Amino acid sequence: MLRLSGARGGTVHAGTVAGAAAVALLAAGCAGGSGSGDSGADGGDPSASGTVTLVTHDSWALDDKLISEFEQESGLTVEVSAAGDAGTLVNQLVLTKDSPLGDAVFGIDNTFASRALEAGVVEEYTPADLPDGAEQVGGALTPIDQGDVCVNADETWFEESGLEVPKTLEDLADPEYKDLLVVTNPATSSPGLAFLLATIGAFGEDGFEDYWASLVDNGVRVADSWEDAYYVDFSGAGEGGERPLALSYATSPAFTVSEDGSETTTSALLETCFRQVEYAGVLAGADNPEGARALVDFLLTQDVQAALPESMYMYPADSSVELPKDWQKFAPQADAPFEVEPAEVSEHRDEWIQRWTETVVG
Amino acid sequence: MDRDSSRLSLRLGLKPAGLLWGTAVAVPLGFLMIFFAWPVAALVARGLVPDGVLDLTGFTEVLSSPRTWRLVGLTLTQAVLGTAFSVLLGLPLAYLLYRRSFPGRTLVRGLVTVPFVLPAVVVGVAFRTLFAPGGTLGFLGLEESLAGIVVALVFFNVSVVVRTVGGLWERLDPRTEQAAASLGASPVRVFRTVTLPSLAPAISSAASVVFLFCATAFGVVLVLGGVRYGTIETEIWTRTTQFLDLRAASVLSILQLVVISAALAVSARARRRREAALRLVPSRGAARPLSWRTPADLTVALVGAAIVGGLMVLPLAGLVARSFREPDGSWGLGNYVALGTAGERNALVVTVWEATATSLRIALVATVLSLVVGGLVALVVSRRPRAAGARRAVGILDGLFMLPLGVSAVTVGFGFLITMDQPVLGVDLRTSGLLVPVAQAVVAVPLVVRTVLPVLRAIDPRLREVAAVLGSGPGRVLRTVDLPIALRSVGLATGFAFAVSLGEFGATSFLARPDGATLPVVIFRLIGRPGAENYGMALAASVVLAALTATVMMVAERLRDERAGGEF
């Protein structure tokens, strides 16, 4: 809300806020009447003030030091605004296309990329130093980081039970692993959608329902959200859950490392993964496109790329950047995650979720 | 209203009266229009008129789907059950906490409000931990059941009943009941024929608020209901934020509005029949010390203890206990110490303490806004003009200000994005965070109205008439008759508004900036990260939020007692 305790700003007093609210009330009233033009009635050219606004999702985090260094070098002032989860972010951008919420965006993922491109919310821009292997989408969305959504296993539980840790998606449907798995709802949770896509990638558009039916027969539990599945149901989180297999991320095992840092009590099943890629881009109709481009470039610099694992729990898009030690050891990425074309996802998302619901919920 | 007020001014020879009432109506109405009706209408219009052409096919599609009617059915069922049980369990608690006095009463009153502000995600996880097969209440089989959802809804909302009804109950003149009893009526009969009718306005006031909260509950329904349960609200949320299916979302929003307006109209009708001027006494006069020897007192005390214990202490105890556990399993303050940090692996942009300060500042602004707006609405609505048209207008105004509770926060939040798209003085309101206290105030206003209104309505109109006949102008009547009485409920209204603002998550999550995150937003973020330390911090932060709320409520309580003392 009010930028009350800004990381880089001062403090706004309650009086100012109340005053601003009053101004807002008045101004909004006027704007409603006239639909006033977009000429610089609001005080000059925004790019001259050198402010660049980054619109992102609620998982955004980046070291303040990096941002102030960027501000000093570029002469820009960075404002960050967060919209909700990745889906909410893209939908808000589509809704506000004619009057964008900011200049640059970070956090559109590969499951929503096509929707953003089709709606034309981002404009074409290709950074000069695109790292090797980083593939743009539509010439407008630049990959910044990526993460694998995979089933996690509670190693300790499996050790104690004498059961082999499962490896593949097929294993999860094996009666040997009955009532052990918890996943999340693809309609309300982004890892849930990623896992649904993994099964579509693995079994095809015509085969995934059969697979899910076999999971249901095998007693899969569907939780609403990641936190719900991980902290309530998953035994590996150490909060009293009873299921040793839970949908999470390939990086999660780095959070269950023992005190001495020698081993982790959970692992990710790397043959059950879907890769989420997060993109940045310049918003169409941005007030400060120059600044937005500089910001996208900034996200690709080695310093930011190296900071991503610690700040956003994602792997950098630039594969030449060194990963933190415990990630190298405990959080490897999948070699061959399942894939579904972004355009396919965009076209069939609703239908697939509906078919999933019919299969799993009935 | 015009004819009536002009006749009034004519009779009293006072021109400013019309102006006064005009302002009292215009300010809140303007607020509601700009910050609620306009954004909602704009978003609904976007769904119904895509690309400039009216498209009503969404109606036939959505309304002919059996799923829609199943959602409507579930929405009403859980809301009705949630409301009924909140009232049923709230009444004995209200009696215990407002008609009887005992040591530690203020503390219990504060604690009862705590659930009201806890983030749904935390409550959801707390209840699921109880209901899960291995949990304390696993044997009840409440996991993924309607009963489980209803229990959580009652947990959240029972305090609304306790507070609203208790506030009136403690000032009911006990002599009426005493008179009935001395004429030979049994305690049950006294309660049924004297007490209950007097409390009816407060009960129906509270019930309609609780009904709206239950009907639009979102987080707990998703977490506790699993994939099988959904409501109109959860459907609007997924349609809007995940599918960008505004066509269906718009139809559902309209459906939600219709269902909720119908329910409100029914309750308003019931309420109107029961309104009456009541004999009120100072709050301290009515409460008797709890006596362990009378069977009636003992029963109420035991019932109250069972409700508080089973419904509130049980789910919260696990949460509080876990907040004091270290990652290695030992007990300690580690999670609380960590609240000054950014969390395990920098999970946060701001520390929990910074977020707490932000929350308090925002809540202050939101409270002031909602007291001004809500106070004015309550004042206007408390009048019963003689002309039928004017009476109807007042009734509509009353209902209008309840609607923000019945409309999805998603619809309002997304609506802001469309309507506030022009910068004001170079500031883009949508991303500035300035709208957060405004959005919270919109939700808090109905509660302020419902808290202040029963008290204002209970004022005997003859009191005002006498004052007027004796030559007091309308301003003076307000100052000397309405204000002193209204002020007593302002403490409670302040507490409620503050609590609503502290706990609001839906709209806030859309409008707050990362560096201006509030406590619930930060908690949501912490619990969304792996790591025992982050989970522990999320719970510790929830305890901080709970303690903060309880404190604010207790202070508000004090405020009221002091003001009330000596008057009347």
Image (cartoon, coloured by chain):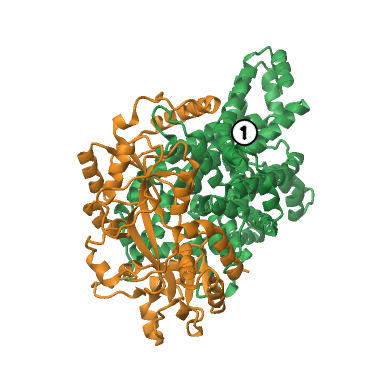
* Chain hosting mark 1: B
Q: Position of residue A149 (x, y in %)?
A: 40, 66
Q: Position of residue B382 (x, y in %)?
A: 66, 32
The C terminus of chain B: image quadrant: top right
- The local secondary structure at tag 1 comes to helix
Viewer-proximal residue among A294 and B275? A294
Residue nearest the viewer, comparing A49 with A347: A347
What hue does chain A carry in this figure?
orange
* Residue found at x 44% / y 27%: A38
Label 1 neighbour load within 10 Å: few <14, some 14-19, many 20+: many
Among the chains pictured, the one given green colouring is B
Residue found 55% across the figure and 60% down from its top: B222
Is B169 rendered above or below residue A166? above
Relative placement, left or right, of A186 versus B47 is left
Q: Nearer the viewer, residue B150 or B277?
A: B150
Q: Residue furthest right?
A: B184
- The three-letter amino acid code for the residue at tag 1 is Ala
Q: In terms of depth relative to the viewer, which is nearer, A292 or B286? A: A292
- Quadrant of the image for the N terminus of chain B? top right
Residue B385, percent from left and from top: 73, 26
Q: Which residue is mark 1?
A: B378
Q: Is residue B349 above or below residue B317?
A: above
Residue B423 picture location, percent across and down = 43, 31
